[in-house]
Amino acid sequence: MNENNQQPLKERTEQSLFWSLLNNGTLQVLNLLFGVVLARLLSPGDYGIVGVLTIFALLAGNLQSSGFTQALINLKEPRDEDYNSVFWFNVLASVVLYGVLWLCAPLIASFFRQPVLVGVSRFVFLAFLISSLGIAHGGYLLKNMMNREIAIINFIALMCSGCTGIVLAFNGYAYWSLAWQQVIYITVLNMGRYYFVKWHPSWRINFGPVKRMVGFAVNILFTNIINTLSGQVLTFIFGRFFPIAQVGNFTQANKWNTQAHSFVSGTMGQVVQPVLVNVAGDKERQKRVFRKMLRFTAFIAFPMMLGLALVAREFVVVVLGDKWLDCIPLLQVLCIAGAFMPLHTVYQQLAIGCKRSDLYLWCNVGQIVIQIGLILLCYYLFSQSILAVVAIYSTFMIVWLAAWQVVAKSLIGLKWMEALLDIVPFLVITVAVLAITHFATMWIESDVLLLVVKALLGAALYIAVMRLARVKIFAECWDFLRKKLRRKPVF
């Protein structure tokens, strides 16, 4: 492929990454602000009530989309009838699923020994019913790499839902404020998608396109279900065997860990698959693109997540309050695994982009089977320690990255040493920088000052090392950012 063909793709990728980073960065800042206010207004028990429902809502969401969003993205040129077919399938599937979950609400409440879950769950599950109306539109935005529009939509939706949650919590609605926050968010999100996407569904219902995509989509569906189980299995198990307040502490720790690593995971998830589809058929070019994505991910994820682990105590004490002290060790352990989660996303998107949803499926099947076995074994060995179970879970998530490397080697010939050279230098530099930061700030007694100094000193040292070492990915990001700032305003 000649240079003229490569340049537009490079420009589109850079623009897409920029808007994805802006989108996810803005979301994380807003989530931070809203999360802090809500954490101070609500109790661990309130978070536990809504937290145990997350797995059901996510599983229902997986079933409603059934992998057809990724299938649409993988089509070279999706037609209107493709989007229309997926739209109506999602809507009909969601109506059925909501009916099933509505009937199952008493069983869910009985399992977790929380009678209030009957009404709360039936309300929270409305979110995925509403979301079915915008899944095809979301696929359209991702396929066309409309990340600027996605950023605007997410910003408005988060502002509306966050403000609603705070107002309700301030007025004493407790866990209901979290439930309303979820429903308002997806409602506004869909309104934004309808505003920006020119395509709209028609009444000419034809499930032929869905049938043609089903082979690929089914593997994605089962894998998404497995990923959901993997991500929520701890909350589910804790909700059954531990007091709801302890579940709330884990939910709070997991919330901040997930928000932090999803900043990078979400960015790469919006970009990697569409870019790899554009270079399909050229393994060498796919390999070059993928390695650059790996370096970029490691460059961002390691300092962010390990840095959060470093300041976890000060962050919780200063920002969330003393009532959340028990979640500090949980947050620190989760952040160590969270540093590697964006790399999982990049590897997974490689399998999808190469149209190997079968490998994507089976690698995740192996992960969840081993994972559940280890968690249950650890629970019975350390039945009184949530921290021990979380530590086993986190260790396994890091080790399982090796399985994804085997997949990458089979798909694009990525060697182990190549992957290590792309990832390990950023890990080593981050650990060294944070170790220096830790010892250099040990004399500070004020938690507020310690939080600020650790964050600023760690960031400054990391940037200094990147510049002195002339790290290419840092130089490219810096040059692009300078060019972007010299042009017209972002909005």
Image (tube, grey):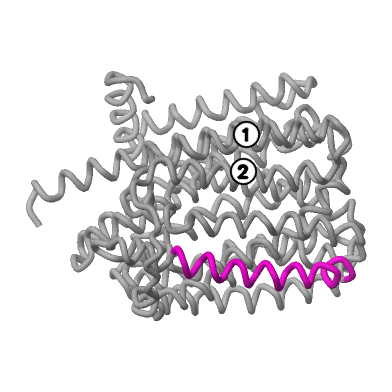
Magenta stretch? 87-110
Give above or below for 10 relative to 89.
Answer: above
Between 101 and 406, the one lying in front of the other is 101
Residue hosting label 2: 185
Asked if residue 88 is among those painted magenta in the image, a careful observer would answer yes
Residue at 70% of width from left, 65% of height from top? 56
Relative depth, front residue between 21 and 214: 214
Query: 245 and 63: which one is in front?
Result: 63
Provide the secondary structure element on which disc 1 rests.
helix
Residue where numbered disc 1 is placed:
160
Along the polypeptide, which appears first: circle 1 or circle 2? 1
Instruction: Look at the numbered discs 1 and 2 and tell me whether their residues touch, using CB distance below 8 Å.
Output: yes
In the image, residue 167 sits, relative to residue 93, either above or below, namely above
Total number of numbered discs in the rendering? 2
Q: Give the quadrant of residue 32.
A: top right
| Residue for point 33% across, 66% down | 82
**Element on which disc 2 rests:** helix
Q: Is residue 98 visible?
A: yes
Q: Amino acid at mark 1?
A: Cys
- The kind of residue tagged 2 is Tyr
> Left or right: where does residue 390 sit relative to residue 148?
right
